[in-house]
Amino acid sequence: MEQLKHECGIVMVRLLKPLSYYQKKYGSWQYGLNKLYLMMEKQHNRGQEGAGISCVKLDVAPGSDYMFREKALGSSAITEVFQAVGNAVNANSEAWKGELLMGHLRYSTTGKSGLTFVHPFLRRNNWRAKNLCICGNFNMTNVDEVFADITRTGQHPRIYSDTYIMLEQVGHRLDRECERLFVEATAEKKLEGTAITEHIERNIRMENVLKTAAPLWDGGYVVCGQTGSGEMFAMRDPHGIRPCFYYKDDEILVITSERPAIQTALNADFDSIHELTPGHAIIVSKKGDVRQASILPQANNQACSFERIYFSRGSDRDIYQERKMLGQLLRPQILKAIDNDVENTVFSFIPNTAEVAFYGMLRSFKDHLNEQKIKQIEELGHTPTHEELCNILSVHIRSEKVAIKDIKLRTFITESNSRNDLAAHVYDITYGSLRPYKDNLVIIDDSIVRGTTLKESIIRILDRLHPKKIVIVSSSPQVRYPDYYGIDMAHMEEFIAFRAAVELINETGQERILRQVYDRCKEQVLKYEWLMQADLQKAIEYKNDMVNHVKDIYRPFTTEQISQQMVKMLKTQDIESEVELVFQDIEGLHKACPNHPGDWYFTGNYPTPGGTLLVSKAFMQWYDSAH
């Protein structure tokens, strides 16, 4: 309902045969480019602010280009990028004729936009092996630490962004790996001339590069890269926060953020596609040898649950079942909200991401109704008459498509009230879909984050149907905390659950809690920043022991109390219907998504120290602006 932006989607392709093989078998040397395009389009949901691709061509003679890159901005960026590639190929038949391909789809989570910040990022050098191109689905929580680390070695980054700083850090380690091999070639093996270059390019070990760079990284990430000499890698963070899937046969290796993209593009079986082990990297040598290497020790599993609830495409087999289960598990809370009056209730969903959870909710209520019917028949104590059976069996679960996602309205009027009035019509309703003043309306959404769309549009238009009661159901728990691992939720005031808790604190005369949390957060942050100036390693060690004091904001209140306060904030005076909010609980979330326990959005249990530091800073920023 409320569109969240997140970073990002990746695709990597490594052709394992000569290009002539694909020309002969598939009728085009562009087989790899075509697969790259298809897998990027199949992950378009992951990024609509920009897109970029890169290519490395192996064994090119000096004087000819061997690394290519193209980027574009906007929702049509993928099309623009591949059109530009097509034009380049038509102008020069050797352009983009490479075996290593990499693609990226971008959603900004840093507030920085423009072509400069669109991946892939490229670091040029006159030695092929020292050229590096990287992209990723990540957000680093400790850019300041990485920045401090590389600047103290004498580097001078031109741009302060996590991707660019990582490019310089990894590039520096790649330089050192090449220099190690240069010394080995000249001092130990006594090689000369181009034999030195050949030795370096044959023997680069990207795991050496990553093992010296990655220990400083704090965040959720899948970092991908390719070198000018033909090495390729993709590394996943130790907690497995961000997703990464791969497929390999004797023709091709592909790596993506989502499994269905591979299934569709390569007609691959579900079981032939694997998830990259957290803390590991897939590495492909110049020769095309594929290996996995452990880069960092695998930590406790914190795979992102929001990927399952909302972000990833629901066409994934497991995600589809998990979303249905999220809907099914909400039945007890919904029954309580409608006072068990299933017969006079219409069930629906907010288009479009909540549709699968709606099917699960519907299935659960049909099962419930069947159980009730069996019980009624058994309690008759005799063989039911035809009329008795008809009366019992005639009761059914009523579902309608009540809410409709309308065309995206363009608001040319700048005056705020007029804009808000137009924005309220992004959704529309199906008139006559329920009985006025008699039926309850239960409508499910995947998440309730800011509450803006609910207040300005959804509740208002649903009220036009005059339901006895509107029950808005979230298939996820209350979103209470910012995310710092790749999703565009960074400020405390964005969350209606947080604003509701603050209002409850003020209403109950417990304002001291806000000040106490602020003081504790400030004490931690100031000490960390002081240590950063004095000793980077001690600052990192101190950060590891930080506590998320923002949890204290919610501690005095139950989930139901916060939900009730949210209703007060959402329900304007012109709304006639009674309104209630129902949320999934944490236990239900983990039951539905057992392999993705990362729940920091809901619990504040951040998987890395960087998350705890940043939520402390976020609360301080909110408190300073509010007081």
Image (cartoon, rainbow, N blue to C red):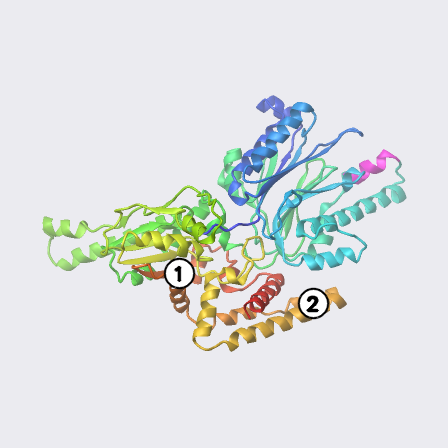
Residue 119 position in % (x across, y down)? 64, 43
Query: Above or below — where is 150 with respect to 539?
Result: above
Hey, what amino acid is under mark 2? Glu
Q: Quadrant of residue 217?
A: bottom right
Q: Earlier in the sequence, mark 2 or mark 1?
A: 2
Classify 450 as above or below 170. Answer: below
User: Is-magenta flag for residue 214?
Assistant: no
**Segment tinted magenta in the rendering:** 193-201
Numbered disc in front, either 2 or 1? 1
Q: Quadrant of the C terminus?
A: bottom right
In the visual, does 520 lie left or right of 405? Answer: right
Does residue 307 appear anywhere in the picture? yes
Spatial distance from mark 2 to mark 1, Cα to Cα? 39 Å
Residue drawn where x is 84% and y is 43% of the image: 182
Within 10 Å of disc 1 (Cα), the crowding (few <14, some 14-19, many 20+) is many
Disc marking residue 529: 2
- Residue wearing tag 1: 570
The crowd level at tag 2 (other Cα within 10 Å; few <14, some 14-19, many 20+) is: few
State the image coordinates of residue 413 (x, y, percent, origin top left): 47, 47
Residue at the image position 55 percent from the left and 37 percent from the top: 76
Decide if residue 1 is in sight here: no
